[in-house]
Image: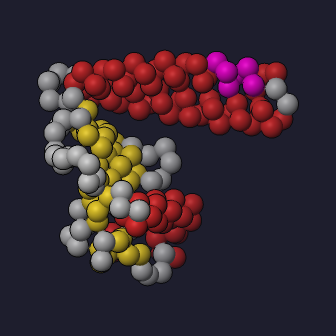
Amino acid sequence: MEEYISFEEGEVIIEGNFESLAEYIGEDAVEYMVEGIEYLNELADDDELIITENGTIFEYSDDEFVLQSGRNRVTRHWWGVRVYTNRANTIQTVRNLRTNAGLVTFVGGLAIAFGPIAVGKFGGIAVAAAGFALVVSNAMENRNTGHTRGIRTSFPWIPFGFSTARQ
């Protein structure tokens, strides 16, 4: 989607015909990307973050000094969010994801088994989300093994997409 965006006057500008892109990645994926970019523009309008002319996006606060680097931080990009965690925070995040996924799977399974149709649909969504949390936690744990630098996990605006890398 890079060829369809530019950065002007503190906003991400989206231009062009997305037809060929939608044929390649799907209309829903394009819609999620556009919604994510519009969300960033709203945050910029509310002075929550700054979008520079070269596409750098960083959070802004008048009340505190924030260093835009380090091992534990979140950065926003036109394509989504990147989370940096040191080794210890990655281990804790993996534990939290697995605990929450287990609880959500249990409750979602009960909803599917015993609930009415509407609750059963919610249960299916909950179980799918819990499954995604387990996939993310496994990938984070695998990437965090064998070094001490921590990892970065990238979540694009497209649902259920992510990648991990060492810091």
Which residue is rendered at x = 46% and y = 61% of the image?
39
Figure quadrant of residue 111: top right
Which residue is rendered at x = 14% and y = 24% of the image?
148
Is 146 magenta? The answer is no
Q: Residue furthest bottom?
A: 16
Where's residue 146, x and y in %? 17, 21
Which residue is rendered at x = 23% and y = 73% of the image?
53
- Please state if 124 lies on the left or on the right of 118 as rendered: left
Q: Which residues are magenta?
A: 106-111
Where's residue 155, x and y in %? 39, 46
Where's residue 20, x and y in %? 48, 75
The answer to whether residue 83 shows anywhere in this view is yes
Figure quadrant of residue 94: top left
Q: Quadrant of the C terminus?
A: top left
Looking at the rendered structure, the number of numbered marks drawn on it comes to 0
25 or 125: which is nearer to us?
Answer: 125
